[in-house]
Image (cartoon, rainbow, N blue to C red):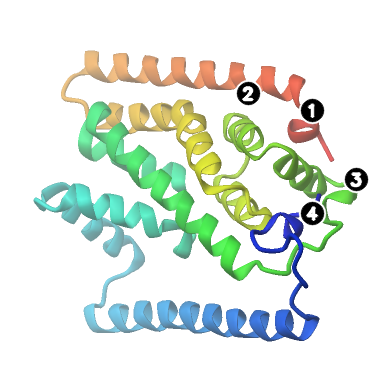
Amino acid sequence: MSSRAQEPGWAGETPPSPRFHSARNRVQTWIAGFFWLGLLLGYGVMVQRTGLTPVALALWIRDLLAESRWGPLLYILFYTLRPLVFFPSTLLTGVGGYLYGPLWGTLYTLVGANLSATVAYLVGRFFGTGLLGREAGGGSGRMARYVRALQDNGFEAVLVMRLIYLPYDLVNYLAGLVRVPWPHFALATLLGILPGSLTFVLLGSAFNASSTAQRLALGLFSLLTLAVGLGISRALRRRRPELGGEG
């Protein structure tokens, strides 16, 4: 069954005309274009007025997150908006561990990562209308296999994709394009990102530990969670070769 046929309101109704879809896609494209242009112009104006280089800007953000009373909320907000500026999620997860330690770093990261996934999911769902045709899952390539898996069982497919470490934002956008029900997507994301989040939070915490013993312990726990995550990934790739195998 195609993703479009699954949309609420289609059963027993006449689908909108191709002209309607074309006009809606043009409007969405213009909205997306103006959004990205606004981001680029805003960044350019800020750099021109402050004279901050990208490295200096990153250090300033680090100090703000570490020293401000609003640091945790700002971290979650930045994590939430991260997919819009293509900032690497693994790097930001490590920063959370470095700044806030294993416990709070994990909590803030899980909140931010799930909000971030929802933002990318909504972007894919809104701006991706019409990008996947009715036969999008009918091919033999890797992307077609992902689409078929998401259409057949969205919760299991998203969970497996998280646990086998497929690119984070690719899964988010694709789930939105295919219109996986959001509750299924959100729960699968929360469960699926736990091993990877713990790995990078603990690694980041190790870099800011107060003693050598703590650094070693955190480093070992990070390696342990990585090994567990890779073990789960390997088992799932064998069970679901259409998701983890080569295209």
Report how far apart the C-alphas of labels 2 and 3 lie in the structure: 23 Å
The answer to whether mark 4 and mark 3 are in CB contact below 8 A is no
User: Which residue corresponds to mark 1?
Assistant: 241
The residue at which mark 2 appears reads as: 233
166 relative position to 59: left or right: right
Residue 128 figure quarter? bottom right
Q: CA distance from mark 4 to mark 3?
A: 16 Å
Q: Quadrant of residue 94?
A: top left
What kind of element bears circle 4?
A: loop
| Residue 191, x across and y down, in percent | 48, 29
**Where's the C terminus, which quadrant?**
top right
Look at 53% across and 82% down and name the residue there: 31
Residue flagged by tag 2: what amino acid is it? Ser
Residue that carries the numbered disc 3 in the rendered image = 140
Q: Position of residue 64 (x, y in %)?
A: 17, 56
Of the two numbered discs 2 and 3 in the rendering, the one whose residue sits closer to the viewer: 3
Q: Secondary structure at mark 2?
A: helix
